[in-house]
Amino acid sequence: MSNNFDEIISRKSTNSVKWEFIPAGDDTVKDKLLPLWIADMDFACASPIIEDLKKRIDHRIFGYSSPYTDDYLSAVVNWFEKRMAWKINRHEIVVAPGVVPALGILIRAFTNAGDGIIIQNPVYYPFKHMILNNDRKLINNPLIQDGSIYKIDFEDLEKKAKDASAKMLVLCNPHNPVGRIWNENELNRLAEICLKNDILIISDDIHCDLIRETSRHIPLSKLNPDKHIITCTSASKSFNLAGMQVSNIIIKDEAMRKKWEKEAMGKCGLFGSNALGIVATQSAYAKGEEWLNQVNQYIDRNLEFVGEFVSEHFPKAHYSIPEGTYFAWIDFKDYGHSPQALEKMMIDKAHVALDEGYIFGDEGAGFERINVACPRPILKQCLEQIASVFK
């Protein structure tokens, strides 16, 4: 590989949330914790992005900036058409500082206080927080765990969709943390249930580029042209640009885009985008494909390494390689520890900071989510520290 993903780059003194603001443990262990929790990579950014950022910095002026240019919009449109054969009209794109902020805007723009919003636990925990903190009702359509495979409970979804309060469903595809990429049949059935019950679908596709060599991501909006499907995308996970704070939200209907604009700009004052974030995102989609292909290959090998390690050192644990994302989702329930005891072991004894399964809903209790988008020596050290405690 032309990129050295084994390189360990210190992220201390860079305002790194992952390494310097770990929300776990007390002061006696914080400095000892090896962090494989929050979803960003420990890999150097793609060289073309860095070069384009340098050129922009050399201009020396960083005033108010808008991403709505032909070059930027073309880079986004061309990326999804090339990678997924998904044709997006550039007028359908609105830009937000992130997918979670976008979700908050969408919830306020298209639902009212007290309305029900469906999620599918175990799922990315900010979904829950954005729903409850905006005074909406959380409706859980929990996934069914069938061995190592997670499935959508369509019978339960049918019932939940008929709830008079239900107005929105937030889909995670690829699903975080379980790693499923929903197939065409699953997506079509979900859309059929929701749309016939007048439920707006918000599809969080932020991990859509981070998939295995044998996997294929299908955007729901590609399958179904209905205007009541909104898709949230970003280069932030794919190219490790979370700190640039730029995401692209695909809203097909003009009237719905106007409602977005009223909420985002009219009520929240969100105007323009991060000047460097615009450059980084455009560069990623226009010039970063080879880097992404290589990083996906490295992540694939890391996930395989986790599988080999778990088989050898954690005989009671259950793990299967996910179809998408860069998360290992490991089931430790058969060891008999409570979720709180498991968390304490990881922090106080193994000295690793992971995302505990229970934060993704009760259905995740007893699991650990490990971010494998890091140099393999760091991943190996993390697993060895966990193994030393279990022994």
Image (cartoon, rainbow, N blue to C red):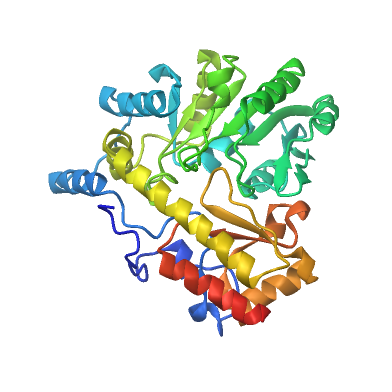
Q: Residue at x 53, y 46 (%)?
A: 325
In x, y percent, where is residue 319?
65, 57
Which residue is drawn at the image coordinates 70% and 44% (left, top)? 149
Front position in the image: 55 or 37: 37
Q: Horizontal and vertical percent for residue 201?
A: 64, 26
Vertical order, 132 against 318 (above or below): above
Q: With 244 as the anchor, is 186 left or right in this view? A: right
The part of the image, by quadrant, that contains residue 23 is: bottom right
Q: Where 37 sits versus 152, above or below?
A: below
Q: Residue at x 30, y 35 (%)?
A: 282
Q: In the image, is residue 7 above or below residue 47?
A: below
- In-front residue for pair 167/75: 75
Q: Is 122 situated above or below 159?
A: below
Where does residue 13 sit, x and y in percent of width and height?
Answer: 35, 70
Total number of numbered discs in the rendering: 0
* Left/right of residue 243 with respect to residue 362 in the rendered view: left
Give the quarter of the image for residue 354: bottom right
Screen quadrant of the C terminus: bottom right
**Residue 32 visible from this viewpoint:** yes
Please say whether residue 351 is visible from this viewpoint.
Answer: no
**Quarter holding residue 324:** top right
The residue positioned farthest toward the bottom in the image shown: 28
